[in-house]
Structure formats: structure tokens, C-alpha cells
Image: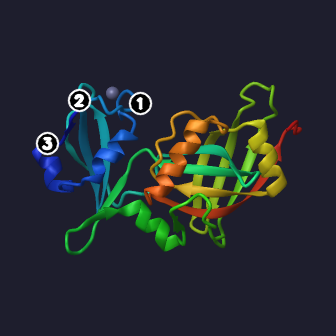
Amino acid sequence: MGSLNMSREVRDVIGEQPALHRTAAHAQCVKCQSFLTPQDDVNVSALVGGNSVAVYFGHAACMRSTVTQGQGELQPVDQMHMSALLLRHNGNHRPVLVGELSTPMSGQDGSGVWFDAHKRYLSQEGFASVTSLADVAPVLPGYRGNLRYRAPGQPDGNTDELLVISPDGPFYEGTIRTSPSWLAAVRAQRQCTLYMGLVGLRISDPDSVTEHRRLREAAADGTLQAIQLPLAMAGAAFFG
Ligand SMILES: [Zn+2]
């Protein structure tokens, strides 16, 4: 079992947070970008901006445990990783997206209590907490997605560009790994469930049973928030 190490200055900023162990288990090393494992010795660092703190993890050999002072308020939507999964439920296929922050965000309220800043932000936006993948998520006005996909068989045919818009502007802009069956389900349903949380998805294979189990466990742990997202598709000829 590896250790989770905080220098004195980091401990003064973020305090003792039991959830850090779980977070570290799903994090990437900020230096070498590889996923951390429970066997690794991990150092914790903090980036402070206004009332927010971003917490970083790195291999002890890659990074020291330090506090850095950022410029202004940190934006909680930076550095999001998005995965596509195709769930099977009551004989139906249900396409979902899973957004995870590579850098967990903490904030501090007036009485000095630390909280998950991104989770609070999403709650204020109207995201619903779910404890089961069967829970029905709300549709939020102004949230929608656009998917620009490449045809299967083309170079990078399983990598598509996704833009998710919120009333405040772009919520996510980047690539996702998809599969023909996931695309076919989105095409038929024109929507998907967007889950946000700490899941620790490793490979972006939409049909991976392991990844489905991780998502179910994250829901049972109460770490997921969700909305129903209208999703439009545009791109090359569709062969799904
Ligand atoms: Zn590393």
C-alpha cells in the first residue's frame, strides 16, 4: 500500500480530507500523466486562487508537495475528461457521457469548511444527485451537445469531437472515443445522460463491462450528478 503525502504548507491549506484517498486513486500524475495506482507513493499539491483550491496529485518521484498561488478565481470546468458508455438497461441500450475533472476542486466557505466546489457549482446549475443509474435525470434549459463524428473505418474513426454548451457558454470542448453502437443509439434517441463525478474511467471503450461497473459503483457511492442532454450529430456518412 502506497502513502499519500502532504507537506505542512499543503496541510495548512486543504486540511485533513478523508475523501482525498479516493480522489487520488482515480487521479493522473500531473507530471508523467500516468494513472496513479493504490501501490504508488503519492504527493498532494495545491493551487490557490481566490476562494478556490485545485488539488493535484503526482508520484512522489515526479512532484514535490507544494502550494502555488494562482491568478484570480479558478474555473471549475478546466481540464475535464469525457467518456462515452453504452449502458444496457431493461433490454434497451442507453448512451451516456461521463465527465470527470482531472483536477478536483475544493472551495472554502465563510466558516472555513472545505467543500467540493465543482459539485456545488453543478448543484446550483440544476444537476441532480443520483444514487442509481436507473434514476431519471432532469433536462436543463440551455444545456445541449453537438457531436461531430468521423465515419468508422476512417483514420481516427473512433474519435469524435464533442461540444457541450451551457447557458454560461462552453461546458466541454474536446474529443471522445465512441463506437458504432454508441453512435447508433445517440442517433436513434437524440439525447444521452451526462454524468459528472469521480469515476476513474481508464479506457474509453463504450462497451467495456469494467467501465460500466465503475460507473454503477460511483452512483452507489453518491458521487454522481446527472442531467439529460439533447445531443445533435453532424459529420460524415453514417455506417452504424
Ligand atoms: Zn508521475
For the point 66% across and 64% down, the residue is 228
Between residues 50 and 12, which one lies in front from this camera angle? 12
Q: Quadrant of the N terminus?
A: top left
The disc placed on residue 82 is none
Q: CA distance from mark 1 to mark 3?
A: 22 Å
As drawn, 129 above or below 159: below
Mark 1 residue element? loop
The disc placed on residue 7 is 3
Find residue 29 and report its horizontal and vertical position in percent: 36, 33
Looking at the image, is mark 3 or mark 2 earlier in the sequence?
Answer: 3
Looking at the image, is mark 2 or mark 1 earlier in the sequence?
Answer: 1
Q: Quadrant of residue 30?
A: top left
For the point 65% across and 58% down, the residue is 193
The residue furthest front is: 90
The residue furthest left is: 8
Q: In the image, is the residue at mark 1 within 8 Å of ligand 1 by its beta carbon?
A: yes
Q: In the image, is the residue at mark 3 within 8 Å of ligand 1 by its beta carbon?
A: no
Query: Residue beneath label 2, please?
Result: 60
Callout 3 touching callout 2 (CB < 8 Å):
no
As drawn, 129 above or below 14: below
Find residue 57 and report its horizontal and vertical position in percent: 31, 39
Mark 3 residue element? loop
The disc placed on residue 33 is 1
For the point 82% across and 33% down, the residue is 151
